[in-house]
Amino acid sequence: MKKLLYSLLFVIPSICIAQELDFTDASDLLPSATVSDHAIGVVDMNGDGMDDIIRMESSGTPGNSTQTVFVALQQGAGEDFVNQIIGTMEVSGTGSADAWGMCVADVDENGMNDLITGGFYNGVYVFKANNDASAYTAEIELNDEIFVQGMSALDIDNDGMIDFFICDDNDISQILTNDGTGNLFEIASGLVPETDDPSDNSGNYGTVFTDVDNNGYCDLYISKCRQGVTDNTDPRRINQLFMNNGDGTWTSEGVTRGVAIGAQSWSADFGDYDNDGDFDLFVGNHDTTSDFLINDGDGNFTEVTSEADLESNFPFLVIQTSWVDFNNDGFIDLLAMGNGNHTVAMNNGDGTFETYDEFFGDFPVNSYALGDLNNDGSIDLYVTANGYGGWGNEIWQDRIFLNNGNGNNWIKVNLTGVESNLNGIGARISIYGPWGVQMREVKAGESYGIQNSLTQHFGLGTNNVIDQMTVTWPSGQVDNFYNVDINDQISIVEGSSAVSVDELNMERTISSYPNPVVDIVSIQLEDFDKLDADDVELRIHNSVGKIICIEQVTDPLIELDLSDLSGGLYTYSLTADSKLIGVKKFVKQ
């Protein structure tokens, strides 16, 4: 069992624990005024290494309305964002066009992220980007079968492709499984999210995948709320934890592990607040005070909200919550927001917190998405005052709040999977130094229907070196790096070396067709004549990462006869003078 929070857990003199934190309203950088609901996102959508902003706005009248989906593309520090329309969602009949959930991942693994979103019985929209994210194609899944709430992505069936878990307010949650080519199907899964006691399995609001017991497999936590139900023992409002057994099966263990909370929760997040190597839990509730629980290292939790002096610090209807290191001191802080209020609990690094609630002036914050919106190594916010729990009938336009920073050091990490899914979703990054161990997991879709950046961020305080960085991939591959440079954004490819994002030519496009492959695959490498390399090599890997083919590349168009390959999922990688320049997957029929 961990020591009590009010005890001195450790002493780290090299890390500055000063809690200076300040934000600047930089909404004038937005290309247009937008009034979004609570489902918003901050994530790189065009592959340039910088976080962009996903926002939505409704028009029309109830029963005949349209939700327009925009991405505001970041151009660099101090530069205006550039607008791009991703697509629209149409709603007819009863209900509204509001999106309640959002998730971003590269569904078809063409190298560009796709957007999955949905709302009140208008289907699950999958907006797929083309190979340079200049246009999107909309596909609709589940039609009018689901009242979408939160959603999250993970390789649920361990086949190397991203699948989606989608919360349903009025029925059992749904799973969309990837067939290996980017097509999603509603099929049977070993994850059956039924309540422990019989019910209609409704009341599913927030969702997050995380590895709570350190066994290498991400588990699933569902925040439950059933409106109109006042009995806190009703299974429709008791949060659920499904443990991933690693063999395709999942087991409900919320009660035995101490996280079966029945307080009408909308969101939750896991983070290692004390850098001891396991993920702790904060749950945002509506009926009672929110809950802070610590992990004993084996995935069992103890509620210590009062001991942490956090019991009275979230006196509002919590919509969103996240762990994030705002001041780059090496210890994650806690953010909760909703109903026009917010609390930031700054982590002092000694097991205690200092809380603040006046960071955003008179703007009545309700929801947010997190990422680095000026590429300076500090975490910023895109916020909205609207959506459920929003600020009355007054209309507030969305805003950007940039973190002013404080001089502390940092590092950001992007992952590219080879045997694992291309985004590296579900991977764990651990960095070691005087702070102990800091850990992050790559999450797609979290809290209550928001998307935070897929780029993982670490604060380092005044330390100027990372002794060791370890990436544990969903495939089981473990990559280690030593004496890692700081104040940089690096890209790590599964089974390869770490490369600064600045070293990558982000404009180079690699495409392959057809997919699935029957006999011949064509691989096109644009800007081939600009490659300053003596040796360009193509490798094909099977589903367990084994190299089965190596070809020297002398022409921008590569055609390979794969008729002798057995059916299944494969990956190809391209290197120029041993430096990786592209990874993609394909299915052989």
Image (tube, rainbow, N blue to C red):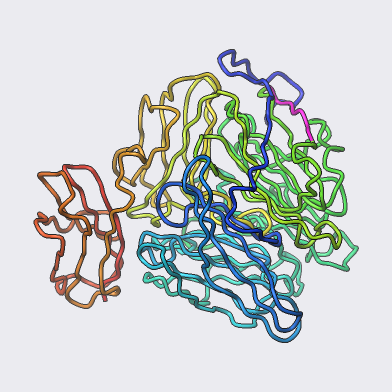
Which of the two residues, 569 or 410, is positioned nearer the viewer here? 410
* Quadrant location, the C terminus: bottom left
Foreground of the two, 294 or 1 = 294
Q: Which residues are magenta?
A: 350-356
* Residue 545 visible to the viewer: yes
**Residue 235 locus on image (x, y percent):** 79, 64
Residue beneath the point at 49% across and 51% down: 426
Query: Where is residue 339 shown, x and y percent of the image?
Result: 82, 53
Quadrant of the rendered structure where residue 128 is?
A: bottom left
259 to the left or right of 76: right
Residue 449 coordinates in the image, percent (x, y) = 65, 60
Extreme residue toward the top, this view: 13
Is-magenta flag for residue 532?
no
Would residue 116 appear left or right of 492 to someone viewing this image?
right
Please identify the quarter of the rendering in which residue 208 is found: bottom right
379 versus 130 height, above or below: above
Query: Residue 273: image x %, image y %?
Result: 64, 33
Residue most extreme to the bottom: 93
Relative to residue 475, is residue 301 drawn left or right?
right
Q: Residue at x 74, y 34 (%)?
A: 345
Residue at 85 percent across and 48 percent down: it is 316
Image quadrant containing the N terminus: top right
Q: Nearer the viewer, residue 76 or 157?
A: 76
Question: Going by the image, does 261 lie left or right of 570?
Answer: right
